[in-house]
Amino acid sequence: MLEIRHLTKVYEGGVRALEDVSLTVDEGEFLVVIGLSGSGKSTLMRCINRLVEPTGGQVLYRGIDVTAASPEELRRIRRRIAMVFQHFNLVRRSTVLTNVLSGRLGYVNPWASLLHRFPPQEVQRAMQNLERVGIAEKAYARADTLSGGQQQRVGIARALMQEPELILADEPVSALDPATSHGVLRHLEAINRDDGITVICNLHFLDLARRYGTRIVALKEGRLIFDGKPAEVDRGWFREIYGQEAEEVGVS
């Protein structure tokens, strides 16, 4: 489904966020990316859909070179690749329903969407997705009145509105408490399992990565240093990824 070839990203000032990263993601995987802050996890995620422009290398999505795609081709690709953001990325003063409906902006008449006029079938679809993540009763509440976990579930419902083939979840639980984190990840797990939607998810905590990932990759200083099954990340690999002085912290 997704192939990353020799991906490199150098920011202004010579900061190398990614260095010659290559990997392939198969259909239906729940791939978790781990590593220290600054290891390149978010840059990798944002290079996949070109929210960040790579300096070198290629990203191929179903054989299409995303890194060389025209603006129109990129819009079509992004329809199929939804994103769930660390800080929710909601319009805080708009209703939950309006935020979810924004996931259809790539499909509906742009003038109608500016006036928040969506076809009844899209409104129904939005309500179904809110029901799926357990917050349909919040549809007409302002987004900024919701808790962090509820806001992230709005983000997941919005992503589902794109009818995606791939969801990129960029540290979706880093701002949440442990119990809420599991709730959000269980929704992503169910979407992956029941809908067959491929998920790539950045996580900080190794126990969450082991619990939800079908495969784990690790970045260190922009380089891919591990690619394997969750059970293969033993104590030795943990110290290689996070440093010799690191202590594993559980999220129960």
Image (cartoon, rainbow, N blue to C red):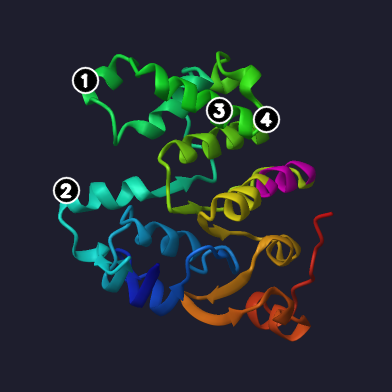
Instruction: Residue at 41% x, 78% y: name it.
Output: 21
Residue 111, disc: 1
Instruction: Residue at 31% x, 56% y: name it.
Output: 50
Q: Which residues are magenta?
A: 179-186
* Left or right: residue 179 compared with residue 61: right
Residue 248: x and y in percent read: 79, 69
Instruction: Please tell me which of labels 1 and 2 falls first in the chain.
Output: 2
Secondary-structure class at tag 1: helix
Residue 192, disc: none
Q: Quadrant of residue 227?
A: bottom right
Which residue matches tag 2?
72
Secondary-structure class at tag 4: loop
Binning the other alpha carbons within 10 Å of mark 1 as few (below 14), some (14 to 19) or many (20 upward) gives few
Which residue matches tag 3?
128
The answer to whether 249 is drawn above or below residue 7 in the figure is above
Q: Amino acid at mark 2?
A: Glu
Q: Amino acid at mark 1?
A: Trp
Which residue matches tag 4?
134
Residue 248 seen from this side: yes
Q: Amino acid at mark 4?
A: Gly
Please tell me whether mark 1 or mark 3 is closer to you in this view.
3
